[in-house]
Image (tube, rainbow, N blue to C red):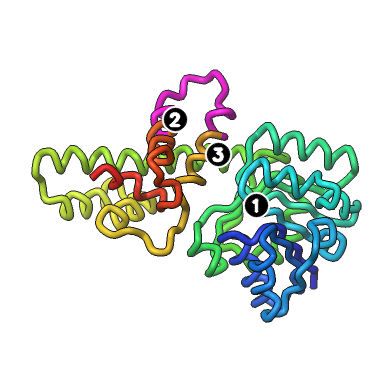
Amino acid sequence: MKKIGIVGLGIMGKGMADNFLKNGYKVFVWNRTKAVAEEFKKKGVVVCSTPKEVTEKADITFEVTANDQSSRQVWKGKNGILKGANKSKILVASATLSVKWIDELLKQCKKQGFVFLDIPLTGGRIGAETGNLTLLCGGNEKVLNKIKTVLKAISGKIFYFGPEGHGMRYKLILNYLQGLHMIGFGQAMKMAKADKMDLKKVAEGLADRPGGMITGIAKTAYFRNPVPVTFSIEWITKDVSYAKKFAKDLDVSLLDNVLKEYKNAVKKGFKDKDWANVNTLKE
């Protein structure tokens, strides 16, 4: 049975730690806020003092921090993941990060001969807590196939997109498209409201056509605030910002509009609200 390391205990990291434990794995964790990590001690998790220590003790280490800045610190700091790694370990970036940083990181891992996968996650709080995340993978497919049994402890679906960095690229594309769909639902409802239509009937209709998971989330949040927050406005703004940098000079005006909507919500003090609340903040 492989030993699992998790660096970062936010919504995703907590859910992953719980589900690896439930499936009989030995789990080692580190979190910047020590009190959060200490909560896991009573469950049988080993709390480590540094990301380096996590990596030294685990066979597979997952990094699930907030953004490029925090990710860089836990990977390349003096007591970071890379300091505890060797060629027998599997290192996994599961935070949503920029293409620039993920490419720098994978090059560093290749230079040192480390096994590296990028496996960002989707599925939100519910997916993390129930062990039903969708994993978006990049890296050596043979390595991925070797650990699929391990990954089943935290996931319902596993998708492979190609070499290192391609899982992250897909995640940025995905979150841009999901953000676009969310904003589009809000604008459709704005049209219905302006013409005094029955908003609940319109929302029910949209849940059928075009339908889909994001429409369902948007419909529910339009009439009732999500509690607890599943994915904050702060984090979708960060992800779409990274997607914009990934797009570079391409004509992606729709992406620009999505980013503008979410940035405006952050400026108005709504960064901690659920991302689906973007459609009701002005109303």
Relative to 148, residue 278 above or below = above
Residue 253 appears left or right of 215 = right
- Residue 94 vertical position relative to residue 109 in the rendered view, above or below: below
Mark 2, residues whose alpha carbon is within 10 Å: few (<14), some, or many (≥20)? some
Q: Earlier in the sequence, mark 3 or mark 1?
A: 1
- Rendered image: mark on residue 65: 1
Q: Could you tell me residue 235's position as x and y percent?
A: 51, 46
Task: Let me know if residue 103 is in the magenta part.
Answer: no
Tell me where residue 27 sits by quadrant. Answer: bottom right
Q: Quadrant of the C terminus?
A: top left
Q: Is residue 64 above or below residue 169?
A: below
Q: Callout 3, which amino acid?
A: Leu
SS of the residue at dot 3? helix
Name the front one of labels 3 and 1. Answer: 1
Q: Nearer the viewer, residue 28 or 21?
A: 28
Judge left or right: residue 191 versus residue 184.
left
Q: Which mark is residue 255?
A: 2
Say which residue appears at 72% left-offset and 58% top-offset: 7
| Distance between mark 3 and mark 1 Cα atoms | 16 Å
Instruction: Name the spot of residue 250 as percent of width and height, x first.
Output: 52, 20
Magenta stretch in the rendered image: 242-258
Question: Which residue corresponds to mark 3?
Answer: 172
Three-letter residue code for mark 1: Thr
* Residue displayed at 39% across by 53% down: 213
